Amino acid sequence: MGAEYLGPYRLLSPLGSGGFGEVHLALDGEGRTVAVKVLHPHVAADASALARLAREVETMRRVRGPHVAEVLDASLDGDQPYLVTRYVQGRALSAVVADGPLHGDDLVRLAHGLAEALVAVHRAGVVHRDLKPANVILADGEPYVIDFGIAYALDTAALTTSGAVIGTPGYLAPEVLEGRDAGPAADVFAWAATMAFAASGRQPYGTGPVPAVAYRVVHGDPDLDDVPGWLAPLLRECLRAEPAARPSAAQLLNRLAGTFRQRVLTGAPEPVTPMPLSAREAETREWRPGMTPEKRSSAEESRLRRREVIRRRWVVGTGLVVGLLSATGREHVPELSLLLLVAYGTTVLVDAGFGLAAKSRPRVVLDLVCIAGSVALWAGLSTLFSTFTLLLAVGALLFAVGLLALAS
């Protein structure tokens, strides 16, 4: 069966289906992966909705930010109208939270990333109007907002029958449920509801029939019992019934910058009165405006740990090999045997010097032990075993190294 094309895009596989269309993984003309949303027939049949969407698309294409899946292309005048966005490979927040709520740094990165996305969307003059866990993709711990502006552009009389509204109850702001004009403040409400769900694993306004959930949104209080103390007050402010009482997305981002002075670690709530930090702790734990509260310290520490593991393996492994080779050549080529030991010892002593300068006592101790071990191995093996036996051991070692190289 031949490949299926939609315009210049080759459809590969369906990714999912929502209220407005079915999303496919596709390749563009240059072989790059994209997400193609093919509008449902009942949406495509609404000429006024398509006209409004066409007007909004040009504005939506101006949205650019590190946490949004940008609109790349659109075709709204054919038999199968579609939108093309950047493809983000990851899992929906709703699926991630099904395995357990987010804590610590993961929650910090989600809060900051979604706020940044809203700032980018609102700056372009777009209102998302359907921000919810299913429209947030997590990739390597970073959040990406999808489908921004589509709900707003397609919310027309032909698509809302019998007073129904487009969106997900529990994440729609009260003004949306009441049929009032919905602006950027509705997205701030949805941000807070999404964060409450991510932090607690529960719907902030409960579950049940749509009218019951909508009533709780308009007249009740959200469930924030399991939300960390550093986040709950900000969510309450964003979930206020009156849009004017909520902070804007830009104010929200600034508030987050003030709240996250000390990064949340290991899922523990941030202390109300931070304890004094040493210079090293402050460097790794402090979050500053302009920094994504994600990886700077953790990535650097991970890289240093990995480098130290490789160094230790090199020192120990090379010492064993030098000891074996030196013992093998002690009887017939004693000069080469001693040269190997001296070269290894000199190299490791230089490494120990770096460890001494860095005040790393374990590193210096390991280096000295490996030098002594290689000399002891040389003396012991050459005394206990014949040259032929040691040659067999060297051959076995080379064979094992070759197998490891092929396997890698």
Image (spheres, grey):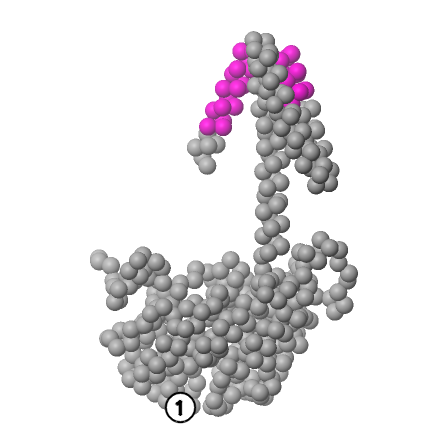
Q: Nearer the viewer, residue 40 or 162?
A: 40
Q: Is residue 45 left or right of residue 361?
A: left
The answer to whether any part of residue 360 appears in the image is no
Q: Is residue 10 left or right of residue 141?
A: left
In the rendering, at what x and y percent does residue 277 appear?
A: 75, 58
Q: Quadrant of residue 18?
A: bottom left
Q: Residues within 10 Å of mark 1 (few under 14, many from 20)?
A: few
Q: Nearer the viewer, residue 10 or 119?
A: 119
Q: Secondary structure at mark 1?
A: loop
Tally of marks: 1
Does 399 lie within the magenta span? Answer: yes
Residue 224, above or below 408: below
Residue 45, above or below 96: below
Residue drawn 61% across the image and 39% down it: 309
Query: Label 1 sits on what residue type?
Result: Ser
In the rendering, at what x and y percent does residue 82 appear?
A: 31, 72
**Residue span colored magenta:** 374-402
Residue placed under numbered mark 1 in the picture: 162
Residue drawn 67% across the image and 56% down it: 284
Residue drawn 62% across the image and 77% down it: 235
Q: Nearer the viewer, residue 26 or 367?
A: 367
Does 297 lie within the magenta span? Answer: no
Q: Main secondary structure of the magenta part?
A: helix
Q: Is residue 212 left or right of residue 285?
A: left
Q: Is residue 52 left or right of residue 210?
A: left
In the rendering, at what x and y percent does residue 316 appear?
A: 62, 30
Residue drawn 55% across the image and 72% down it: 115
Quadrant placement of the N terminus: bottom left
Q: Quadrant of residue 161?
A: bottom left
In the rendering, at what x and y percent does residue 363 appear?
A: 69, 36
